[in-house]
């Protein structure tokens, strides 16, 4: 393909014309007149050229393409390709939200090897929040202008079904404007277990009580081998996929994460992406793909150390290219670190999460990022990268340029 062909393609916004999802409020596309950057696409090395040509023809990438993307020595070339796809989809926009996390309990029945957050329940820092405490927190630490509360906890088998309904109702009672993005697929399965009823019925009741969408956690790496080695006993990969399909069928939008940088192979990362892509083809229920960098401190896997910034950038870029049906890719600054998250905005990511404020899962495992950032700080970090900062709600229905 010549440079002229490439420029013609890009100018016409044609290359991704076969995109399997339409423009919509949650997928608004580039603003009128925006030209995706073709910088770096003309002189890609031989290993990336056939993949570039497939991308430009709107063809889906396969496992072998993914292997070549993970293997290429040209990280910048890979980044340019992912950046081009992202700009075709999202223009120059980088979104974030005004949110806060609420970890209602850290007591957990599972002993996942990657986790520093879980407690048995009798430690001095074990937490189970009661409704009075949660109400007080909502009154004093949340505001009416916040857009989202991210609610997750350990698998605490002591909590009855009514606890989860009360939790949702308390949030809506105190802060009716907050969007509740709550409960991973692991928690949803446990909640249904406690209810002793089919998950389909339980999802309807949780929605009626205030659940608006679900976060993407708990997927880890959708691999039987990794599951057996690191989180045996917890919901197996096929059940995470089955529960997420049920959540989508119930009308709940969710995210999809991948925890990487521990014992998984690059083939296992790719297989994870392909499984997520297949569900998205079926349901269209995922909003964001979120690669999560493993933090080893205070976990049984501490000896592994932390993966590199270049591995993180490569994994984000490969995710953007393989997940051709995912509207948004998040650079989660809490886990990536602020500097890599900023660079990731030119390696395929178009979202940077939000203000966060009280984060335990990564900080218990040694994260050195701040606990939270102000909206003005996030907007500044995005602007510094040349991107347009846009404040969003969870479902991307309400977008305001900052
Ligand atoms: O499922 C656990 C991961 C996830 C560690 O959907 C760890 O918008 C790194 O899913 N090092 C929970 N990661 C976090 C999560 C999330 C975060 C932000 C936004 C959204 C969203 C979802 O964190 C867990 C697990 O995969 N995790 N321990 C650790 N030591």
Image: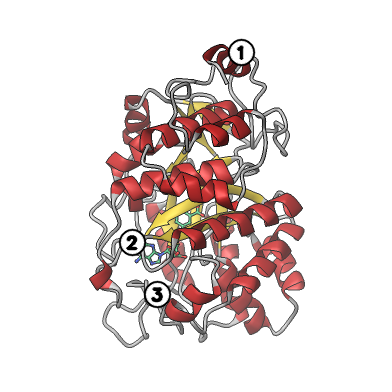
* Distance from Cα at disc 1 to Cα at disc 2: 44 Å
Q: CA distance from mark 3 to mark 1?
A: 54 Å
How packed mark 1 is, by other alpha carbons closer than 10 Å (few <14, some 14-19, many 20 or more), is few
Image location of residue 312, percent across then percent down: 37, 49
Residue 151 as seen in the image, left or right of residue 359: right
Secondary structure of the residue carrying numbered label 2: loop
Q: Bin the neighbour count of mark 3 within 10 Å (Cα to Cα): few under 14, some 14-19, many 20 and up.
A: many
- How far across and down, in percent of the image, does residue 207 sit? 69, 61
Quarter of the displayed picture in which ligand 1 can be seen: bottom left
Front of the two marks 3 and 1: 1
What residue is rendered at 51% in x and 86% in y? Answer: 158
SS at mark 3? Answer: loop
- Earlier sequence position, callout 1 versus callout 2: 1
Residue to which mark 2 is pinned: 362
Q: Is residue 365 visible?
A: yes
- Vertical relation: 376 (above or below) 226: above
* 398 left or right, relative to 116: right
* Side of 374 relative to 21 (left or right): left
Q: Which residue is mark 3?
A: 106
N-terminal of the pair, mark 3 or mark 2, is: 3
Would you say the beta carbon of the disc 2 residue lies within 8 angstroms of ligand 1? Answer: yes
In the rendered view, tell whether residue 390 sits above or below residue 155.
above
């Amino acid at each position: 393909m010549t440079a002229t062909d490439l420029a013609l393609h890009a100018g016409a916004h044609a290359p991704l014309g076969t995109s399997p999802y339409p423009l919509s409020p949650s997928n608004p596309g580039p603003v009128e007149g925006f030209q995706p950057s073709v910088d770096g696409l003309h002189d890609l090395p031989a290993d990336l050229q056939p993949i570039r040509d497939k991308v430009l023809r709107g063809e889906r990438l396969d496992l072998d393409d993914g292997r070549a993307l993970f293997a290429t020595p040209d990280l910048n070339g890979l980044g340019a390709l992912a950046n081009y796809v992202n700009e075709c989809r999202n223009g120059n926009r980088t979104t974030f939200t005004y949110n806060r996390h609420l970890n209602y309990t850290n007591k957990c029945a599972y002993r996942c090897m990657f986790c520093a957050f879980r407690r048995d329940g009798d430690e001095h820092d074990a937490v189970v929040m009661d409704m009075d405490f949660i109400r007080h927190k909502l009154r004093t630490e949340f505001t009416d202008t916040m857009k989202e509360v991210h609610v997750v906890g350990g698998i605490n088998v002591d909590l009855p079904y009514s606890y989860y309904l009360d939790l949702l109702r308390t949030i809506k009672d105190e802060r009716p404007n907050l969007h509740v993005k709550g409960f991973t697929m692991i928690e949803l399965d446990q909640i249904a277990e406690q209810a002793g009823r089919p998950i389909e019925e339980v999802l309807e009741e949780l929605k009626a009580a205030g659940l608006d969408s679900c976060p993407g956690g708990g997927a880890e790496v959708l691999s039987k081998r990794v599951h057996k080695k690191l989180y045996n006993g917890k919901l197996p990969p096929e059940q995470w996929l089955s529960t997420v399909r049920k959540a989508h069928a119930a009308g709940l939008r969710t995210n999809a994460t991948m925890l990487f940088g521990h014992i998984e192979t690059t083939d296992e990362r790719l297989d994870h992406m392909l499984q997520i892509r297949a569900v998205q083809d079926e349901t269209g229920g995922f909003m964001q793909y979120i690669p999560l960098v493993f933090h080893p401190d205070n976990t049984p896997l501490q000896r592994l150390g932390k993966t590199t910034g270049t591995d993180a950038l490569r994994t984000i870029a490969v995710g953007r290219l393989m997940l051709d049906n995912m509207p948004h890719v998040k650079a989660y600054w809490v886990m990536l670190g602020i500097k890599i998250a900023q660079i990731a905005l030119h390696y395929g990511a178009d979202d940077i999460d939000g203000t966060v404020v009280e984060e335990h899962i990564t900080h218990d495992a040694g994260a050195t990022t701040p606990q939270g950032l102000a909206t003005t700080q996030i907007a500044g970090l995005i602007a510094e990268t040349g991107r347009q900062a846009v404040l969003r709600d969870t479902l991307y229905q309400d977008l305001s340029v900052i």
